[in-house]
Image (tube, helix red, strand yellow):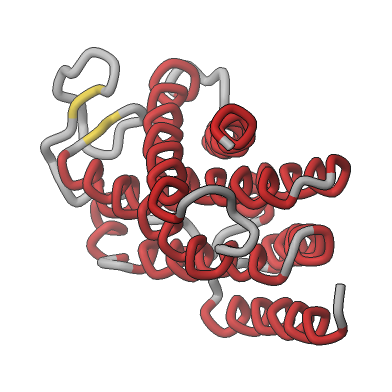
Amino acid sequence: MEIADQTILLALIFGLLGVCIVTRALDAGGLAAATVIGCIIGFMGHWTWLALLIFFLLSASIATRWKYNEKKSMGFAEANEGSRGWRNALANGGAPAIAVLIHEINGEPGWGALALSSSVAVALSDTLASEIGVMDSRTRSIITLRSVPTGSNGGMSPLGMFGSVIGAAMIAVVAIGLMADHLPGGLFQTAAIITTIGWIGCQIDSILGELFENQGLLGKHSVNFLATSFGALAGGIAYVAIF
């Protein structure tokens, strides 16, 4: 890694910590986990890869605080005034970090960039679906399509579905803008792959939530980790199969 890249990377890491402290996006445990994840992604991947994760964190924080008091009165707001802990950091950043570790072993930058982008796309797709979707009372089970209470695990609504598409597409566009030199194939094709995987991963999160979280077999963060892991795996498979 060149000195210029190292300088940018360190600036991003310290900038990430500063922004998280000022905005209270993460608590102390979340900051520690995010720092470790950020170092893995930045030093073993590239600073642009870390920049994509920072974009996710800021977007997720904004979505969490959007109409926060209204969501709090409805019982759907994140605890601790929206400040997220280490479990949340690992649930959303753990799979991208693992993808980068695998990339470091196999030495395929295109594989690593696509796997990371797809995993982060799942994370933001699910976050926007949840944070925006709870404001829509037209909620149905993703499995049975029967009406369920707003905020139910496995519930989907038109507004939430819209949020899931927007979240995945946002990551695809930003990934192309930041990581075009690392991503494979044509830009439109790659953006379509990232968006599609992100949206599907969000739906898998909902299915796991209804089948396992509602039964107490999995927790929220475990479901998130499995969904983002799907994103990384699907991105890696897409690279091998298509590119």
As drawn, 176 above or below 207: below
In the rendered image, the residue lying farthest to the left is 138
As drawn, 187 above or below 232: below
Q: In percent of the image, x 73 and y 85: which residue is there?
A: 11
Expressed as whole percent of the image width and height from the top left, the position of residue 21 reads 62, 80
Expressed as whole percent of the image width and height from the top left, the position of residue 238 reads 55, 32
Quarter assignment of residue 65: bottom left
Quarter assignment of residue 18: bottom right
Is residue 219 among what the camera can see? no
Q: In percent of the image, x 86 and y 72: which residue is there?
A: 1
Q: In percent of the image, x 45 and y 37: which residue is there?
A: 197
Q: Is residue 136 left or right of residue 47?
A: left
Quarter assignment of residue 22: bottom right
Q: Is residue 33 left or right of residue 79?
A: right
Expressed as whole percent of the image width and height from the top left, the position of residue 229 reads 61, 35
Q: Is residue 158 left or right of residue 110?
A: left
In the rendered image, the residue lying farthest to the top is 144
As drawn, 200 above or below 54: above
Expressed as whole percent of the image width and height from the top left, the position of residue 57 reads 53, 65
Q: In percent of the image, x 84 and y 40: which residue is there?
A: 106
